[in-house]
Image (cartoon, coloured by chain):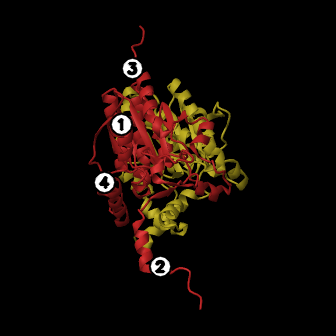
């Protein structure tokens, strides 16, 4: 492993984490007309880290769920630095099921280092909440397309990335855990994160080669660029919605069976 | 000059005496901290003081609980693409320790005439971590159970995802979940028994997807590790944090079943879930 490789891989991690990265809320506003946010998991909570709601993608009514980091420290504290609570995963799943009931497709936008690790989340079944997203997501009878916008780490990202298509922004990463976490588990030394970044193979290019993701898309930084993404999403959703449900679900099963 | 009261043994003599004491005569319970003679744990390997079900290999568990067991896919192992020497060495050691080629033992089992597909994870195979081959074996277990219209009982013990296999380990969570979902959609029963420890990606997927979720006494059950929580959030955590009894109180486990009662409980649950003809 060369220093150059390490430098490159870690630069990708930093780009994915950049504070200049488009906010999920902004991206929703740019992609979706008349977005109407919906709150709550119907079980006693509403996670501010997870945005959910319904809007229009051109002529297509669509459900959107997204994990959002904060812009300021205050916002980050409120949104747990973009790490969802069990309430957040339950809210997502509830909205996805509501979408399926009305044959509306689901767009998931992901920017999260992983599920939030605290006592509250453990007590409220973080593992169960993610497990249920995976289980029910696999049989959800409507198209699900996930876009990794920034960071996507561990089961906390996978919970919203187990649908029909996974796309990645060119400056985003997807891995089993953060390079710092990997370095501290494997070598008990978090400062070896750049080395870990190489080992993790977390760049869009590597993940595309492994068929973990289906498409790498140009970074969206403003409303004009979001238009192109909206067009691409609309075309893909239209194609997926044309599939009979049984075929859609069989295709989704097959997508994960190959790993 | 005073005579010494006794002659101390020479180091050679001491070593000889020590070697006469059988190894591993006693054991310390990792939960209650009490030391006990190993024979006191009985064949079910239960701490005589606190009832904790001690960690055992998958093969031992199969022998303890099943009347009959026919292993399947015993040759599925870690793919050759993982060439890191440190990892290969870990795999070699794990194979020797567990007499398994991956961290899960799968097959067809019978308890009191109830026939089912069984999976048992092994805590001594790289902490029961979820490798691609582990995911493959569990996926096949569900696929074959679905084809045979049979229930699945899965004993989980896992440190979570297998770091050495990176994103492919994460994908196993999705792959197995898809197979569990198909098995469930076919109206078939899935029982999980959470053993010590059940954590990380295994908790966040198939461990928590059972129709019925049982656990062994005092088993550690959680998603994020205690150290991660303490370091990132600076929260101090109570002793009973992530113990099966706590998780039960929070509503995520159906029942805690001591190991020596599991055979009886599983037989009853399986019997009650025999397919019934629905009234037309």
| Mark 3 belongs to chain | B
Furthest residue toward left:
B75
C-alpha distance separating marks 4 and 3: 38 Å
Q: Which residue is mark 2?
A: B9
Q: Nearer the viewer, residue B87 or A103?
A: B87
Query: In the rendering, which numbered label is found on residue B275?
Result: 3
Spatial CA span between label 2 and label 4: 55 Å
The subunit letter for the residue under badge 4 reads B
Residue tagged 1: B66
Tag 3 and tag 2 share a subunit:
yes
The quarter in which the N terminus of chain A is drawn is bottom left
Q: Chain of mark 2?
A: B
Lower sequence index among marks 1 and 3: 1
Q: Is residue B147 visible?
A: yes
The residue tagged with tag 3: helix, strand or loop? loop
* Colour assignment, chain B: red
Q: Earlier in the sequence, mark 1 or mark 2?
A: 2
Residue B153: x and y in percent read 41, 35
């Amino acid at each position: 492993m060369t220093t150059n490789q390490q430098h490159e891989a870690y630069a990708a991690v930093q780009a994915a984490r950049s504070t200049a990265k488009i906010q999920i809320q902004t991206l929703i506003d740019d992609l979706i007309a008349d977005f109407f946010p919906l709150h709550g998991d119907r079980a006693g909570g509403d996670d501010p880290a997870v945005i959910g709601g319904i809007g229009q993608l051109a002529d297509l009514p669509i459900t959107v769920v997204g994990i959002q980091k904060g812009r300021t420290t205050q916002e980050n504290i409120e949104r747990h630095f973009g790490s969802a609570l069990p309430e957040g995963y339950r809210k997502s799943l509830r909205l996805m099921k509501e979408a399926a009931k009305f044959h509306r497709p689901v767009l998931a936008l992901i920017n999260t280092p992983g599920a939030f690790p605290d006592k509250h989340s453990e007590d409220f079944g973080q593992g169960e909440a993610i497990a249920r997203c995976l289980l029910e997501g696999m049989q959800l009878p409507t198209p699900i397309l996930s876009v990794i916008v920034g960071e996507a780490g561990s089961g906390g990202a996978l919970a919203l990335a187990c649908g029909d298509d996974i796309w990645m922004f060119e400056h985003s990463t997807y891995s089993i855990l953060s390079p710092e976490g990997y370095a501290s588990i494997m070598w008990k030394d978090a400062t070896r994160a750049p080395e870990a970044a190489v080992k993790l193979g977390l760049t869009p290019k590597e993940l595309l080669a492994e068929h973990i993701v289906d498409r790498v898309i140009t970074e969206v930084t403003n409303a004009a660029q979001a238009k192109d993404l909206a067009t691409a999403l609309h075309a893909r959703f239209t194609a997926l919605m044309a599939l009979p449900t049984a075929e859609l679900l069989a295709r989704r099963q097959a997508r994960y069976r190959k790993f | 000059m005073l005579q010494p009261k006794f002659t101390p043994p020479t180091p050679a003599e001491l070593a000889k005496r020590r070697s006469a004491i059988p190894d591993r005569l006693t054991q310390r319970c990792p939960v209650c901290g009490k030391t006990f003679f190993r024979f006191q744990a009985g064949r079910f390997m239960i701490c005589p003081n606190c009832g904790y079900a001690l960690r055992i290999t998958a093969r031992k568990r199969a022998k303890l609980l099943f009347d009959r067991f026919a292993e399947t896919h015993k040759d599925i192992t870690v793919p050759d693409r993982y060439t890191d020497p440190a990892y290969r060495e870990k795999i070699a050691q794990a194979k020797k320790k567990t007499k398994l080629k991956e961290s899960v033992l799968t097959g067809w089992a019978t308890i009191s005439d109830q026939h089912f597909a069984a999976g048992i994870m092994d805590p001594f195979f790289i902490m029961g971590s979820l490798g691609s081959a582990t995911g493959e074996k569990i996926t096949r277990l569900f696929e074959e159970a679905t084809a045979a219209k049979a229930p699945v009982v899965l004993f989980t013990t896992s440190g979570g995802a297998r770091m050495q296999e990176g994103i492919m380990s994460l994908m196993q969570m999705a792959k197995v979940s898809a197979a569990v979902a198909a098995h469930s959609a076919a109206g078939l029963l899935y029982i999980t028994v959470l053993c010590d420890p059940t954590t990380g990606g295994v908790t966040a997927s198939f461990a928590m997807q059972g129709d019925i979720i049982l656990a062994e006494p005092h088993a550690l059950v959680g998603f994020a590790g205690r150290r991660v929580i303490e370091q990132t959030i600076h929260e101090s955590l109570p002793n009973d944090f992530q113990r099966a009894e706590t998780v039960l109180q929070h509503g995520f486990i159906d029942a805690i079943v001591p190991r020596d009662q599991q055979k009886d409980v599983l037989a009853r649950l399986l019997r009650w879930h025999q397919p019934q003809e629905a009234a037309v």
